[in-house]
Amino acid sequence: MTAYRAIVLEHFRRPRNRAPLPEANRSADGANPLCGDRVRIQLRVEAGTIADARFTADACALCVAAASLLTERVRGMRVADADAIDAAWMSRSLGGDPPPGRARCATLPLDTLRHALHTLEPASPS
Amino acid sequence: MSDSVLESITHSDEPHLVQATLVSATGSTSKKVGAKMLVGASGKLLGGVTIGGCVDAQVVEAGDDLIARGGRRLLGISLDDDEAWEIGLTCGGTVEVAIERVAPSDAADPLVAAYAAVRAALDADRAAVVATPLDGARAALVLDERGDVSGSLGDPALDAAAKAMAADVLTRGSRADTVATPAGARRLFFDRFAPPTTLVIVGAGQIAMSLTAFARELDMHTIVVDGRERYATPERFPHAGAIRVGMPSEIVAGIRPAPRVAVVLVAHDYKYDVPVLRQLLRAPVGYIGLLGSKKRGAAVRQLLRDEGFSDDELARIHTPIGLEIGGKSPPEVALSILAEIVAVRSGTRA
């Protein structure tokens, strides 16, 4: 079994941080309209640092694995550093490039993370 | 009993009509206790329901007299017919049909008042039972799933006995039965009305399109769920009761689980199947079906078993989905799925 396959299966079967984050103050949904993958990234950002990151997904194994790896990685990161994570990092983390035609499965969580990072924090109740 | 009779009575502009209800049956008749028909003056059939065969003719024949004189009658009808027996075409057995005159525009009419209470219960997604005496003066008492009671049979002791039996009918289905009171035994008919089956279809493909078309004929309310906007469209699903696009597991989790909810997973894609099943296996829905081969079904079950679901929970998944009727095309598969849902609902299949 290739490293890529082993990593994807490990994170699909035992995803890290797959749960709603009720205390999130940043959230974004991502979808692939062609294959139907759906992912939500939720963050708790405190003083410019990602204190917690979780995801929920109805998505393929690759997309779930990518979201799992990503939320593991960004916990404790500064927002600006998380924003700089790119597809090359994702490929390295997955142990290789996704097969032809599947790149979008791996980058959907990444794009969704960026959207979440740029959502405005809800106003505090007065 | 479906609520089409309620609608027909509610919207009728007839001053009087006759409601006929099959209250008991012996032998091999295919009709279900609770089956109904409505007849207006001169034998005019109202609404789209009939009891069927020779019963209809006798109801129509008795109808005009009842419309003129009012009240109620209990018809005992033999389905045995000498000539038909000889050629093997008769159902055989006997049926009892209760017929009574109803004044649709009179809110005080016992049945009209009872049906208003039933309508309110159904609108709140609750089943209800109407108890009516099979002899004596017309009256009706309604008990719904929440325990709300309306109407009366004219005797507190009879009301109490009827209420106790109606609670049983809520789970077991319509029947005629005898209740004992200090004043003597009374025979009543308990008519159960239930909200329609809600059919949740996950995966907006071709099988789903056929499911929505057929389910409408079965009075089912359909909800089509998919994560792909271009699939789940009103153009592709003109018969759907609702179309929901989003994360399928979240959408399904937001639908109130109940025994009358059936969920079919026909996306044939684990990305939806597994998360939706996680939501369903511990929810009290009446039916869970998964499209796919035995091998695929076993793989999905194993994945969920590894997550901690028990064998009993996993046994709730009907897979391969549908009754085996030998069909392969999407409409044929849809037909087999609906047949299985009906079989499970009626208790002929676990």
Image (cartoon, coloured by chain):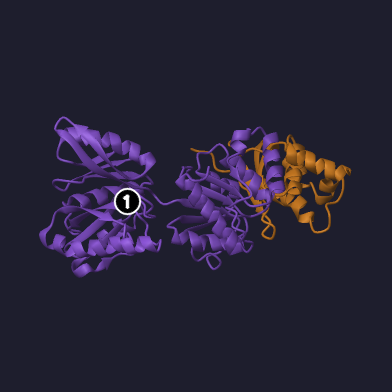
Depth order, front residue of B38/B79? B79
Q: Residue at x 24, y 61 (%)?
A: B59
**One can see residue B76 in this view:** yes
Q: Which x, y percent locates residue B268? A: 66, 54
Q: Please state if B232 lies on the left or on the right of B60 as rendered.
A: right
Q: Residue furthest left?
A: B69
List the residue tagged with mark 1. Answer: B34
What amino acid does circle 1 point to?
Gly
Residue B330 position within the rendered picture, expressed as x and y whole percent measured from the top left: 61, 63
- Compare residues A102 and B177 and report the one nearer the observer: B177
Relative to residue A25, is residue A78 drawn left or right? right
Q: Colour of chain A?
A: orange
At mark 1, the secondary structure is loop
Colour chain B is painted in? purple
Residue B102, given in percent of the width and then of the height, sits at 19, 57
Q: Is residue A58 above or below residue B50?
A: above
Q: Is residue B147 visible from the viewing direction of this image?
A: no
Q: Residue furthest right?
A: A2
Residue at point 30%, 62% (across, down): B54
